[in-house]
């Protein structure tokens, strides 16, 4: 077995190609897979993002997983279909598609008017300065360098007739969500038998329930724990203004396949406390990323912890074959789970190791 790049308190990092490293792991040895694989968008020119991991990666991931193991994999809206097909063709069962909504994405679009002036060899007249708003910043981690929030860009006007005709046209929309695939390795027999034999096969609903707000106008409690909702406002009612009743679980709302950041949650909150129905997490702040972490796609720890809690059994081992800067490892370790991370980029292995070392006191206290 390959020597770990990093090993401490139930956390192991391997530096290398995940396909090769996984081939050295034992069959049926992990209890969950939570990962953020390449989207195949060539994001910021990064070599590791030139393609979506194909069938061989997910076949090997299937081999090392116990029957009933859940796989969580983020994807890009343009290439999610390739990710889903590869995972399904490898033998996994696609169970759901979760949505992570955020309001701070930045549109990656070509200005058609500018392109026409450039093709004509014409220099556009600068008439002012445009200050960029939204789209993240070096502090939030969604963008880096001089193009973040507050960056000053020259404001120009169209010069050629063709450019004037195509003023206001672009080639892309603002990204505001990412799909998250939820798949499962086929169970051995029934779910009940699989759970008893392997400890896998289900997702932890109660651990991920959402607290009920006291001022929610659509939820009223009465003796016997009955929930009443108006048919006018409730999607589960007939829509004819009648009142429906259902048993009410005071542990909280059933977790949905929708997750929000602070911006999208704020917009829903304006609509009758809508945020209370979905998992809310803020974008990853600079302090959470750790010193020197320049990975361009760092996910919030609260989001990763929520997903880990959903699919990793107690005392389970989780694998992240596309570890990046180690957010899955930190999130799972905060839950007291053992983790295995793999990354083909040694720099990111170093960044993840440094982040984990900073978190060690917390990990050790969780495991007492």
Image (cartoon, rainbow, N blue to C red):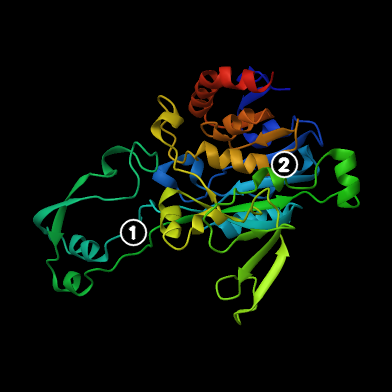
Where does residue 261 sit, x and y in percent of width and height? 46, 49
**Is tag 2's residue or tag 1's residue first in the polypeptide sequence?**
2
Instruction: State the mark number for residue 266.
Output: none
Horizontally, is 245 left or right of 35 in the view?
right
| Residue at screen point 67% across, 52% down | 182
Residue 77 seen in the current view:
no
Say which quarter of the image contains residue 238: bottom right
In the image, residue 325 sits, relative to residue 118, either above or below, namely above
Residue 61 is tagged as: 2
- In the displayed structure, 28 sits above or below 161; it is above
Say left or right for 234 vs 223.
Answer: left
- Can residue 98 be seen here? The reply is yes
Please say if 160 is above or below 136.
Answer: below
Of 271 and 153, nearer the camera is: 271
Query: Label 2: how many residues lie within 10 Å, few (<14), some (14-19) or many (20+)?
Result: many
The N terminus is located in which quarter?
top right
Q: Label 1 belongs to which residue?
A: 109
The answer to which of 131 and 212 lies nearer the viewer is 212
* Percent coordinates x, y for residue 4 in the rendering: 65, 20
């Amino acid at each position: 077995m390959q020597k770990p790049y990093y090993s401490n308190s139930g956390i192991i990092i391997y530096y290398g190609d995940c396909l090769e490293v996984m081939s050295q792991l034992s069959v049926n040895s992990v209890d969950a897979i939570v990962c953020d694989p390449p989207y195949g968008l060539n994001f910021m020119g990064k070599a590791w993002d030139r393609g979506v991991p194909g069938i061989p990666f997910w076949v090997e991931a299937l081999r090392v997983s116990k029957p009933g193991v859940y796989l969580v994999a983020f994807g890009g809206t343009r290439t999610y279909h390739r990710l889903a097909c590869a995972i399904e063709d490898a033998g996994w069962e696609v169970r759901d598609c979760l949505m992570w909504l955020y309001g701070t994405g930045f549109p990656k679009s070509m200005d058609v008017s500018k392109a026409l002036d450039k093709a004509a060899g014409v220099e556009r007249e600068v008439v002012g300065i445009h200050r960029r708003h939204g789209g993240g910043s070096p502090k939030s981690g969604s963008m880096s360098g001089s193009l973040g929030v507050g960056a000053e860009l020259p404001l120009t006007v169209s010069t050629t007739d063709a450019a004037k005709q195509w003023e206001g046209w672009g080639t892309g929309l603002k990204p505001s969500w990412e799909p998250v695939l939820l798949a499962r390795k086929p169970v051995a027999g029934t779910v009940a038998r699989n759970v008893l034999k392997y400890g896998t096969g289900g997702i932890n609903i109660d651990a991920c329930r959402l607290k009920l707000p006291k001022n929610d106008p659509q939820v009223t409690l009465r003796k016997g724990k009955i929930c009443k909702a108006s048919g006018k406002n409730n999607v589960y009612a007939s829509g004819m203004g009648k009142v429906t009743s259902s048993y009410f679980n005071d542990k909280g709302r059933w977790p949905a396949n929708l997750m929000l950041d602070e911006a999208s949650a704020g917009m829903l909150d304006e609509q009758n406390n809508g945020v209370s129905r979905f998992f809310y997490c803020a974008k990853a702040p600079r302090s959470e990323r750790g010193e020197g972490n320049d990975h361009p796609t760092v996910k919030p720890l609260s989001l990763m912890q929520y997903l880990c809690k959903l699919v990793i059994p107690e005392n389970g081992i989780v694998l992240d074959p596309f570890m990046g800067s180690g957010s899955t490892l930190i999130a799972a370790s905060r839950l007291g789970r053992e983790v295995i991370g793999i990354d083909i980029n040694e720099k990111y292995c170093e960044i993840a190791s440094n982040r984990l070392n900073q978190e060690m006191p917390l990990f050790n206290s969780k495991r007492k």
